[in-house]
Image: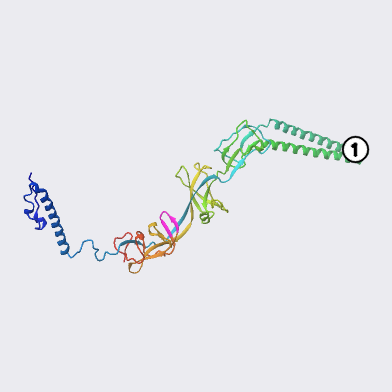
Amino acid sequence: MNYETTVDSGKLGGFVSDSMVDGIDGEAGSRRKLWVGLAIVVALAAVAAMYFFSSGGSTDFAPRDGQQAPAITVAAPGRATIQGTITATGSLAARREMPVGVVGEGGRVVSVPVEAGQWVRAGQVLAVIDRSVQAQQQASSAANVEVAKADAQLAQANLDRAMQLVERGFISQADIDRLTATRDAAAARVKVAEAQFAERSARNAQLNIVAPAAGLLLERNVEPGQVVSPGSGTLFSIAKDGEIEMLAELGETDLASIAVGVPAQVVPVGTEKAFSGQVWQVSPVINPQDRQGMARIALAFAPELRPGGFATATINSGAIVAPMLPESAILSDDDGSFVFVVGKDNKAERRNVKTGLITSDGIAVIEGLTGNELVVMRAGGFLTAGETIRPIRQGSREAAK
């Protein structure tokens, strides 16, 4: 078997001739093939060495002059008015919930003309209790009034006749005094009877369970046929004027930063609609177990605001004027928060700062910056203090002067 290998000696710079590869056959073919391969490797190494030393040992990876300093994006943040916000969660409730129960004697409920979710007016009947027995008692009291009035009229007539006879000497003055007393007693019994009738009428009126004020009926806990008494508990629950509130739970730090009257936006669970309100009460105490307090946010009535539901509130916590930086510009270590600013001769200088409000637009720097400095916006974590940089203003492709 014959093997023929062709090697371009020109590519090897003249180090390999045709005689090195011709005549490879027989049993010595394999050995010669090995030697030819070694010769090719040696020739390639020699060519590379000659090229390296002839170029003076230089390569294209050496950094060029003027490009040693890294290009870094910087910006002067200035000062802006920043509106702080606090996000809190909590439950919805009636701002003034009025429980309604049995006021009078109680009895069997004969009708309940209202349903939960309805608006009721002040004095509207919510439930009626059977008054068949009480009606008879009221009639009896009315009859007693008439009897007392008749007795009073008779006593007055007797006294009038006696006064006519006393002038003729037929009746003594003592008889006149006795008849006067009888007349006065009869008049007093009329008043007693009228008072008893009024009391009975008032008791009967209490058998109608009525709304103490206008509002939204939240609960109805009674049905016709049910026997109720003053110990039956709450039969109806009314949100006065339909006013709703959110009980927002806040940490003690956040609670200290808000005040009564600040606006808030409330979004109930299950809807993306926001409802405007304002904080009308801030809890005067902090729960010692979870270190939280309550901010009560007043809301106008809306069908989506259901007492007992869950909601999220965004509360305004005041405004400050300060530089605003992106999160990428603010670094931190064991000494606290800091940023890099462009100093003299374009050297990076560390500047310790104190951060404040955190918003969707960035982080407010309340101490450490005036807003006129050129601050490194990104890549600050790769810099060291005193390092020379090539600052490029944000939004510009040219180096800052």
Q: Is residue 285 left or right of residue 49?
A: right
Residue 361 position, x and y percent, is 40, 55
- Image quarter where the N terminus lies is top left
Q: Position of residue 69 (x, y in %)?
A: 29, 64
Q: Quadrant of residue 225?
A: top right
Q: Toward the viewer: 108 or 196?
A: 108
The region drawn magenta spans 356-364
- Asked whether 42 or 134 is in front, the reply is 42
Q: Residue furthest right?
A: 169
Instruction: Kindly identify the residue that appears in the image at 33 percent across and 69 percent down.
Output: 345
Q: Is residue 383 left or right of residue 144?
A: left
Quadrant where the C terminus sits is bottom left
Q: Which residue is mark 1?
A: 165
Q: Position of residue 232 (x, y in %)?
A: 64, 37
Q: Nearer the viewer, residue 183 or 261?
A: 261
What kind of residue is marked 1? Leu
Above/below status of 134 relative to 265: above
Q: How far from the left and from the top, in percent, is residue 260?
A: 54, 54
The residue shown at (69%, 37%) is 203
Front-most of 329 and 197? Answer: 329
Neighbour tally class for label 1: few under 14, some 14-19, many 20 plus, Cα within 10 Å = few
Identify the residue at the far front of this view.
27
Secondary-structure class at tag 1: helix
Which residue sits at x=77%, y=38%? 192
- Is the stretch drawn in magenta largely helix, strand or loop? strand
Q: Quadrant of residue 46 in the image?
A: bottom left
| 213 relative to 339, above or below | above
Q: Look at the picture and state if 353 lies above or below 274.
A: below
Asked if residue 120 lies left or right of residue 364, the reply is right
